Image: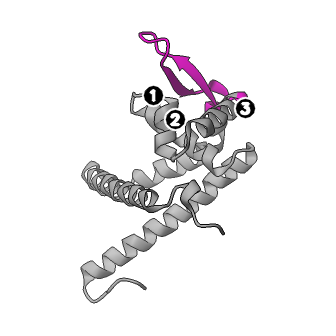
């Protein structure tokens, strides 16, 4: 619709772009369904994803980094973390080397809820990737990693262009 489709490459790029848009929309619906079942809002869900991503990368996230990633003030992050901790989704762990430093981690209850909800999707994903060779998966992974970087760069640019709440025109 928005892209030229005169060549096979242009057609493929347009189809991939449409596939990514549909995938993103469907993923958001699934995330919102999970959030709704567990009394979470969109920010809560993004926070849980950030905590999970950090843990999977082997570098647990601090509340300060979570706030930077989500574009939240320290007060908002504290309220967010308190709420998620009370609900059993995350826990605070003190750094063994520096007791002043706090890391956020998935709590057992929160992880169990996520596994229960997302396990059927995991099985579907396993069936899909079984049809691809290791070389194809390497290409898909490289593509998705590059697209994720591009999306985050754009997200950060959009965030930087937004006026601060105190400087927004009255609406």
Helix or strand or loop: what does disc 3 sit on?
loop
**Where does the image place residue 39, in percent across and percent down from the top left?**
75, 44
Give the CA distance from mark 3 to mark 2.
15 Å
User: What's the magenta region?
Assistant: 86-112
Is the Cβ of the residue at disc 1 closer than 8 Å to that at disc 2? yes
Q: Which mark is residue 60?
A: 1
Q: Residue at x 54, y 18 (%)?
A: 93
Is residue 85 placed above or below 100 in the rendered structure?
Answer: below
Q: Residue at x 32, y 81 (%)?
A: 11
Residue 115 can be seen, yes or no: no
Is the Cβ of the residue at disc 3 closer than 8 Å to that at disc 2? no
Residue 101 covered by magenta stretch: yes
- What residue is shown with label 3? 87
Q: Residue at x 54, y 46 (%)?
A: 123
Residue 15 covered by magenta stretch: no
**Where does the image place residue 2, in percent across and percent down from the top left?**
40, 84
- What residue is shown with label 2? 51
| Residue 80 falls in image quadrant | top right
Specify whether 119 is left or right of 22.
right
**Where does the image place residue 66, in percent across and percent down from the top left?**
50, 37
Residue 94 can be seen, yes or no: yes
Specify whether 62 is left or right of 147.
right
* Lower sequence index among marks 1 and 2: 2
């Amino acid at each position: 619709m928005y892209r030229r489709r005169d060549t096979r490459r242009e057609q493929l790029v347009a189809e991939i772009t449409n596939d990514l848009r549909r995938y993103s929309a469907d993923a958001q619906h699934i995330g919102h369904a999970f959030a709704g079942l567990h009394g979470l809002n969109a920010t809560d869900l993004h926070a849980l994803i950030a905590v999970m991503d950090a843990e999977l990368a082997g570098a647990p996230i601090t509340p300060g980094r979570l706030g930077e990633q989500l574009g939240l003030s320290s007060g908002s992050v504290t309220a967010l973390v308190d709420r998620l901790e009370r609900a059993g989704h995350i826990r605070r762990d003190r750094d063994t080397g520096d007791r002043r430093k706090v890391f956020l981690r998935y709590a057992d209850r929160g992880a169990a809820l996520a596994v229960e909800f997302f396990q059927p999707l995991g099985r579907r994903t396993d069936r899909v990737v079984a049809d691809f060779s290791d070389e194809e998966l390497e290409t898909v992974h490289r593509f998705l990693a590059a697209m994720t970087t591009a999306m985050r760069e754009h997200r950060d640019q959009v965030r930087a262009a937004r006026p601060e709440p105190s400087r927004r025109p009255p609406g």
